Structure formats: structure tokens, C-alpha cells
Amino acid sequence: MTDVQTAEVDPPWEGLTGAELHAACMHAAREGDRQAMARLVDELTPLVWHVARANGLDRSVAEDVVQTVWLALFSQLGKLRDPKALAAWLITTTRREATHPHGRRMQPVPLSDEVAEAMPSTQPAPEDEAVRADRDRRVWRAFVRLPHRCQELLRLTVLAGRAEYQLVAEALRMPRGSVGPTRGRCLDQMRDLLASEGGSR
């Protein structure tokens, strides 16, 4: 009984991060370990979600894409040759799913006045929100004018953080040492685009 409890407390991926964590979880998941599957979902769903949303999907369609991607993975766990390439596989599969026509033009359901009035507001003042929305629009316009490679790199580095540059490098098939400098150049381009339309501040 003690051994079983210890195994549950200390799974084989304990203390691992990044691609090593994903590989350990993949191996365990192939043996039917549901805890490993859950850890993969917790660890990488933000990545899948971000890629889906970055491809222009609204929230409800993005949720469907995320579910489809995970079902695709777990239905072919034994076919993925290199578990360490899991993140790259998820990115590629999510992009492919996001190009399908299932509901990409769906518009969000409007909130009725009655429901809106009954909901407590946690939003900033209208003036502050207007300033933020204007800033976000300028940032987004600058972002979509960047080269596609820069867009992908910035999305992934924002999501993964500096500690996971190796994961970003693997996903984009580029040397790890070039992630930081390339990111810096992309940010400089974005600042120039913002400055050109008066949105640098």
C-alpha cells in the first residue's frame, strides 16, 4: 500500500520541465496513465489554445479545435515518433484544424440588456477601457504587419517565457541561441510600426 501511494506522489516526470516533461508524460500515457494524460493537457493546453486563437478563431470554435487536437493526440499516442517533439506536433495539428471551415465565421452571441445589468461589473471605468481598447487595436495592427515568422516567435515566447526558449526553438525549428536575438529584432520592428502610427506610448 505504501509503495502504491509513493508511486502516486512521485510520478516519473516529477521535477522535469519542458520537452523532458512532455516525453516522460507521453511514455506514461502510452501505458494508460491517466494522470500523465491530465498533466500533458494542463501543461500544453495554453499553447494549443493560443495557436487556435492566433489563427482568428472565436472562443467557442477555438474550444472545439482544442478538444479535437487533444482527441487526435490521444487516439494516436503510439504513432508519434519523438515524444520530445510533442509541442511542435500540437502546433502543427492546431494550425491545420484551425483552417477547417467549421464555424470560423461564427459571431459571439450578444448579451441581453437584462443579463448585462444583472451582472456585477469587474471592468475598468469606460474611459480607461476606451484608452486600453485603442492601445490594443494599435498594438494588434502593428503585430499583424510583422512577418509571419516574427508573429509566431512572439506568440510562443510570450506564452512559454524565457525559461522555455528550447521548446520555442524546437517548435519553430531554429537554433536555441537565435531565439532571443530574433525576438529582439521582431520587437524592434513592432516598435517601429507602432511609432509610425503614433502608438509607441
Image (tube, rainbow, N blue to C red):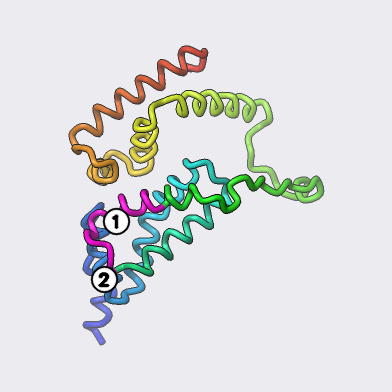
- Is residue 15 in sight in this rendering? no
Three-letter code, disc 2: Ala
Residue situated in front as seen by the camera: 80 or 114 = 80
Q: Which residues are magenta?
A: 78-93
Position of the N terminus by quadrant: bottom left
Q: Residue at x 21, y 82 (%)?
A: 3
Q: Which one is earlier in the sequence, the residue at label 1 or at label 2?
A: 2
- Is residue 79 in sight in this rendering? yes
Query: Which residue is the site of mark 1?
Result: 86
Q: Residue at x 75, y 46 (%)?
A: 116
Looking at the image, residue 78 lies above or below residue 93 = below
Q: Nearer the viewer, mark 1 or mark 2?
A: 1
User: What percent of the width, then of the height, locates residue 59?
Assistant: 57, 49
User: What percent of the width, then of the height, locates residue 76?
Assistant: 34, 68
Residue situated in front as seen by the camera: 14 or 137 = 137
Q: Residue at x 43, y 50 (%)?
A: 96
Looking at the image, residue 79 lies above or below residue 20 = below
**Mark number, residue 28:** 2
User: What percent of the width, then of the height, locates residue 49?
Assistant: 46, 50
Looking at the image, residue 27 lies above or below residue 122 = below
**Mark number, residue 115:** none
Secondary structure predominantly adopted by residues drawn in magenta: helix
Q: CA distance from mark 1 to mark 2?
A: 14 Å
